[in-house]
Image (cartoon, helix red, strand yellow):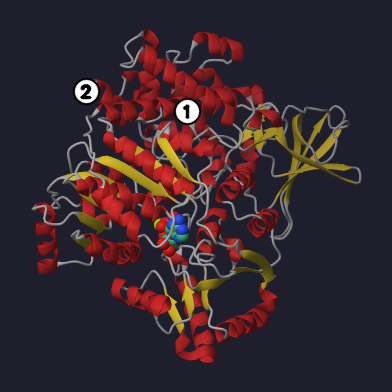
Amino acid sequence: MRPEILFPLFTPVSTLQGVGPRLSSLYEKLAGPRVLDLCWHLPVGMVDRRYAPTIEDAISDRVATLKVTVSRHIPSPNRRSPYKVICHDHTGEILLIFFHARGDYLMKLLPPGEIRIISGKLERFGDTLQMAHPDHMVPIEEEADVKTVEPVYPLSAGVTLKPLSKAIRASLALTPAMPEWLDESYRAQESWLSWRECLEKVHTPLSDDELTAFSPFRKRLAYDELLANQLAISLVREQQTAAKGRIIKGDGTLRAQMSDILPFKLTRSQDKAIQDVIKDMESPNRMLRLVQGDVGSGKTVVALFPMLSAIESGFQAAIMAPTEILARQHYKTLKPFAEKLGISLVILTGRDKGKARKVILEAIADGSTQMIIGTHALFQDDIVFSDLALAVIDEQHRFGVHQRLSLAKKGAGVDMLVMTATPIPRTLMLTAYGDMEVSRLTEKPAGRQPVDTRTVSVERLADVINGVARSLEQGTKVYWVCPLVEESDKSDLAAAEERYRELAERFGDRVGLVHGRMKGPEKDAVMEKFSMGNVDLLIATTVIEVGVDVPQATIMVIEHAERFGLAQLHQLRGRIGRGSEKSTCILLYQGPLGETSKARLTIMRDSDDGFVIAEEDLRLRGAGEVLGTRQSGLPEFKVADLSCHGELLATARKDAKLIMDKDPLLKSERGQALRVLLYLFERDTAVKYLKSG
Ligand code: ADP
Ligand code: MG
């Protein structure tokens, strides 16, 4: 149950005064549906209205707050001319200018003879001081409200600053004084104010420095958020590893046979990763290990050996892939080995329906099948395993935590091996997994050559196509990637189809097209032809991004490379350079390029190390944007910015560890406050685990 102290923050924004149905739906889209969300809607700028000169001294082009007496109104003579109001103080006159104004309204606001506080941007034309559309025109009693620094918030269509600021003020007024959840000595050392004071300060910036991530007020709030994140991860982890695992210890026969028929020698880091996993499985604890290896580093065999170990021990092993194409590819890779080893292997995807599906489900349930490959279809409710010991999740960033857990629940104490080619920077790893055990594949299989990457302006498209023609004549296979920014973006699909038509006109049947809107079997058929058959030039949208393996393809052209993120470009490029032939990647860009796009393309040209690229990506953009947090399964932060708050994260991690050592059930006074913190950052699931602990 959410602590009562937080109730006011979790009420809908519509309960705020002056926020009706129209505004509340706009605020919901902009910030979120609750008062708390408005509190987290932080200013990105400020307007300093403290400059309050006399009319005579006033400097042009500055925002100022003046105390004036209204002299007279000059209504506009026609629709094109402005309505003017002349005001004065004891040093001179100022002209207020209004376009498309309503006279009666202005007369009410600025009655002649009255004193008014006006605030806005000054302009001087010759001898005349002017202010067009003042931001504020209020009676003298309200002077103090105006002569301050005004925060500027991100806005959206239909949302203007004044009512939004008012709603945010109202939200802040509802924030309760929280119990202190920080370690007192640490807080004192950093000279941090309380949570509520910091939130207030963040919303009333007095200088540009206070708007940055390095402001002490923002840092405290960021620390709170990171501590909530690290503590939640520790609590969940405690829960997962506390659940009993099983000792899975095969006799090694299948693995020995497999080593004999494997057509290549494992790299050292593959060997090490396999040993890590096997050791985890042999221990009575439940395994949760991440294998992180760049595209093409050979993660599939790393999964294969532990799967064989599970099968040697009489259990089942499953591997789940995020797309149909990938699942089929794993099937194709593993099938010949399974046959030689005498293992029964099935594949289950969303495409299997009716009777065929039923047959597969039966084989999984009665244990007659030992190795199972599948897509999301694998964790549906009616899938029952006979005895699942090991679940491998390939390209795990494509799956949510819940999907991962639901596969883990398909057996008793299932060991989990998750694999990713996304080179997640260490800082981000910590926020997503805490100290999850990691094996890294640091080498590429022997004989691989680095991909020669070039950036080429789209103006030279004709040259590039001629180059592709020459390569095709020499028997090379070529990927041609067109951007599909969003799955629903029809015009991008049209661009891919257009490019396909154009190239098909020149190269005939040798050209294929694959995109996300195609039906599964259609996609497979094209991929199959590209991999084995007579399609040599494959026009594709990003559906080929993850995992597809066609070693004979050595050229990739990426159109509109400037539209892709670094991680995505790296993933795409990983499709080539998989054989022993020299590979080339051409990044076609449409100029003029912005600074960031230019930097990104340069990094791509100069490096092919996924981890270097990921760290650069983190530096170039905020952490939240790296990889696209939604699709990557990484947490999104409200205040914390990992490109600036890396050190805070490290401290929060240590702090969380100490808390888990000293007060794992959060029972002490600080523990109780920490519960509030977890709820404040909506880590409810983590708190739930406390009960069962
Ligand atoms: P990824 O890590 O991207 O999933 P894969 O497992 O698909 O990589 O492996 C890429 C290719 O490299 C496959 O064709 C695989 O057979 C091959 N491969 C894997 N390990 C080695 C190795 N040690 N030596 C040579 N080739 C290897
Ligand atoms: Mg793979």
Residue that carries the numbered disc 2 in the rendered image: 692
Residue that carries the numbered disc 1 in the rendered image: 225
Question: Helix, strand, or loop for circle 1?
Answer: helix
- Dividing the picture into quadrants, the one containing residue 239 is top left
Of residues 6 and 106, the one nearer the viewer is 6
Q: Is residue 267 shown above or below 276?
A: below
**What amino acid is at disc 1?**
Glu
Q: Which quarter of the rendered picture does the C terminus lie within?
A: top left
The nearer-to-camera label among 1 and 2 is 2
Q: Position of residue 559 (x, y in %)?
A: 58, 70
* Residue 663 appears in the picture as rendered: yes
Is label 2 within 8 A of ligand 2 (CB to nearest ligand atom)? no
Q: Which of the four quarters of the rendered structure image does ligand 1 lie in?
A: bottom left
Decide if residue 470 is on the left or right side of residue 363.
right
* Residue 191 appears in the picture as rendered: no
Of residues 480 and 143, the one nearer the viewer is 480
Q: Position of residue 501 (x, y in %)?
A: 49, 85
Q: Residue at x 64, y 65 (%)?
A: 452
Q: Earlier in the sequence, mark 1 or mark 2?
A: 1
- How far apart are the two marked residues, 1 and 2, measured between alpha carbons? 24 Å
Q: Position of residue 193 (x, y in %)?
A: 56, 15
Decide if residue 101 is on the left or right side of residue 67.
left
How crowded pointer 2 is (Cα within 10 Å; few <14, some 14-19, many 20+) is rated as few
Q: Which quarter of the rendered picture does the N terminus lie within?
A: top left
How crowded pointer 1 is (Cα within 10 Å; few <14, some 14-19, many 20+) is rated as many
Q: Residue at x 68, y 26 (%)?
A: 206
